[in-house]
Amino acid sequence: MKKILSAFLILGLLLSFTPRTLALSLELDGSAQNVNATLYNGTTYVPLRAVSKLMCPDALVSWENNTAYVRTAKLTISVTPWSYYIDANGRKLFLKDGVRLVNGTTMVAVRVLAKALGASVSWNASTQRVSLTSGSGSLISGDEYYDADSLYWLSRIINAESGGESLLGKIAVGNVILNRVASPDFPDSIYDVIFDRTGGVQFTPVANGTIYNKPSEESVLAAKLCLDGASVAGNSLFFLNPTTATSTWITRTRTYVATFGNHKFYA
């Protein structure tokens, strides 16, 4: 009897941690489509192949080395299951819950796929319907989109501050930099935020010189994701490692937002 009760307890715990999924309807340019759209953790997911072919009938969809590819005359998308991003013409587009693989079908967040395809998305909560509107069918390339100077410095501060952290931890540091750029209380460029000396050096890597080290591939990836809108740290403007921090004023005066690895983030 104890074994049976334990089994039910474990099952209950697993179910309690399983994100909610809900079947939705989908339409393209006003016409209903027979596509399996699913609400997962508050995000609408759609099958990569089906929606890509609907929106770009000439698209070639293939599976190569554990990665799905969608190719048209003006767009190449690569999608790896369980990754936190997809690549579209060299752009890195973030999915907060990652790419999913459901019964052999690659599922992606509909807004991310729509962005890659140059389309728009709307949501009708009362009918539980997702509406896609066709657009350009493409996306400006990463070479054109990412400003070289912004990418150079953002990737370096991410690497210097969080080189040993996870991808999400790296994105969080990038979020702090870009949040400061957007804030009227800080300088208005990535370079000036990093090298800001108002009230003293803002970031340790500026003082010890590690800001100039070549960034890892993942740090560059994190920088591109941030520049393309990835956000995991909300409106955070500060972060620290509580085990090495020499001052506690941030923890005493700022609002806690999140923890990623060794860093805690505050707004």
Image (tube, helix red, strand yellow):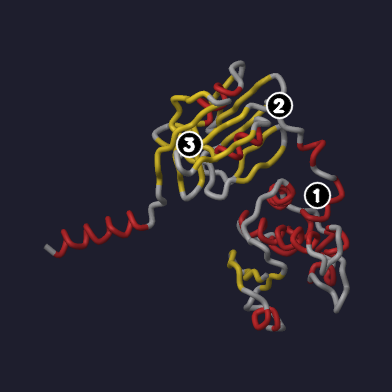
Name the mark nearer the viewer: 2 or 1.
2
**Amino acid type for the residue under numbered disc 2:** Ser
Pointer 3 and pointer 1: residues touching (CB < 8 Å)? no
At horizontal 41% and vertical 51% (from top left) the residue drawn is 19
Q: Is residue 199 above or below residue 110?
A: below
At horizontal 79% and vertical 70% (from top left) the residue drawn is 203
Task: Point out which mark residue 151 bears.
Answer: 1
Q: Specify whether 19 is left or right of 111.
A: left
Earlier-in-chain disc, 3 versus 1:
3
Res 249 quadrant in image: bottom right
**Residue 114 in the image, given as x and y percentages of width and height:** 62, 34
Classed neighbour count for the residue bearing mark 2: other residues with Cα under 10 Å, few (<14), some (14–19), many (≥20): few
Q: Is residue 222 above or below residue 211?
A: above
Disc 1, SS: helix
**Residue 116 in the image, given as x and y percentages of width and height:** 66, 34
Label 3: which residue? Answer: 129
At horizontal 43% and vertical 37% (from top left) the residue drawn is 24
Q: Is residue 217 above or below residue 31?
A: below
Label 2: which residue? Answer: 136
**Amino acid type for the residue under numbered disc 3:** Arg
Earlier-in-chain disc, 2 versus 1:
2
